[in-house]
Amino acid sequence: MPIPSADQLALAQQLADASAEVIRGYYRQDFAIIDKDDDSPVTQADREAEKAMRALIEARRPQDGIIGEEFGEQNADADWVWVLDPVDGTKSFTVGRPLFVTLIGLMYRGEPVLGVINQPVTGDRWIGGEGVPTTLNGAAVRSSAVGELAGAIIGTTGPEYLPRARPVFESLARRSRYQIYGGDGYLYAQLASGWLQLVVEEGLKLHDFAALAPVINAAGGRMTDWQGKALHRHSEGCVLAAANATLHAAVLPELAALTV
């Protein structure tokens, strides 16, 4: 798998800076909340932040493609494609809770190779991928070595978002150390830093997971679909993120059974 270039790494940082500046201008301010066709909320901050990132990509790397949550695909068949989610966790953003993140992914021929998880308010920024060990604000981080479910903290955005996996998640949670809800993409950043050990979710879209898998994997964790396959552009969006391969292997069969 190709390693992102120095130019691409620099651009990823600039995209995070540019989107954060837009988002901070709206944080805890008055703004309209619009319900999209899938009943998820969107704000002007989402749209303006994505526009700012798209403008930078078009100026710096016009040969690259873009897939964004708010404005769709542009040159999406290019070898290198940026995947943008300007505000992942819009509900948290709308109530002034700093549990949302900006997700910036870079794919090579449909395979995620670089991810940025950026929290615009706190300034926390995780970045990692192929040939790029995961860092938090420039300092190296590693996922947890906990390899048994009984010692693991497990998270998901909310049980209501697990129409198929809820019974499995609840069973895992009962056998885990404890469970935590909420956080959207922030959960995966916490896993990369070693603060929790498992995340189970379903129904994610490309812009939800393209940035997450590279960060998790480059921190020593493992993030796949429920069959244990690497995530890619056409993945269904049912994911398991674990702090290490041992814990991943221990949990995966219970989720894999849902795909038979």
Image (cartoon, helix red, strand yellow):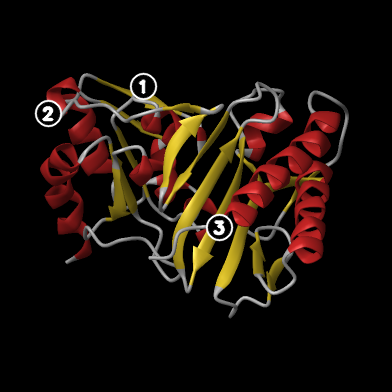
Judging by the rendered image, the residue that carries numbered circle 2 is: 148
The residue lying toward the viewer, choosing from 88 and 40, is: 88
Q: For the point 15% across and 57% down, which residue is it?
A: 257
Amino acid bearing label 1? Trp
Q: In the displayed structure, does residue 248 sit left or right of residue 9?
A: left
Q: CA distance from mark 3 to mark 1?
A: 30 Å
Amino acid bearing label 2? Glu
Amino acid bearing label 3? Ser
Q: Give residue 113's position: percent from left, percent from top.
A: 45, 58
* Mark nearer the N terminus (2 vs 1): 2
Q: Give residue 5's position: percent from left, percent from top.
A: 55, 57
* Mark nearer the N terminus (3 vs 1): 3
Q: Secondary structure at mark 1?
A: loop
Q: In the displayed structure, does residue 113 sit left or right of residue 95?
A: left
Q: For the point 43% across and 37% down, which residue is it?
A: 134
Q: Give residue 198's position: percent from left, percent from top.
A: 29, 34
The local crowd at label 1, few if under 14, some if 14 to 19, many if 20 or more residues have their Cα within 10 Å, is some
Q: In the displayed structure, does residue 178 sit left or right of residue 189?
A: left
Judging by the rendered image, the residue that carries numbered circle 1 is: 195
Residue 146 has which mark? Answer: none
Q: Residue furthest bottom?
A: 77
Residue 142 vs 250, above or below: the answer is above
Q: Quadrant of the N terminus?
A: bottom left
Residue 210 vs 80, above or below: the answer is above
Judging by the rendered image, the residue that carries numbered circle 3 is: 5
Q: CA distance from mark 2 to mark 3?
A: 37 Å
The local crowd at label 2, few if under 14, some if 14 to 19, many if 20 or more residues have their Cα within 10 Å, is some
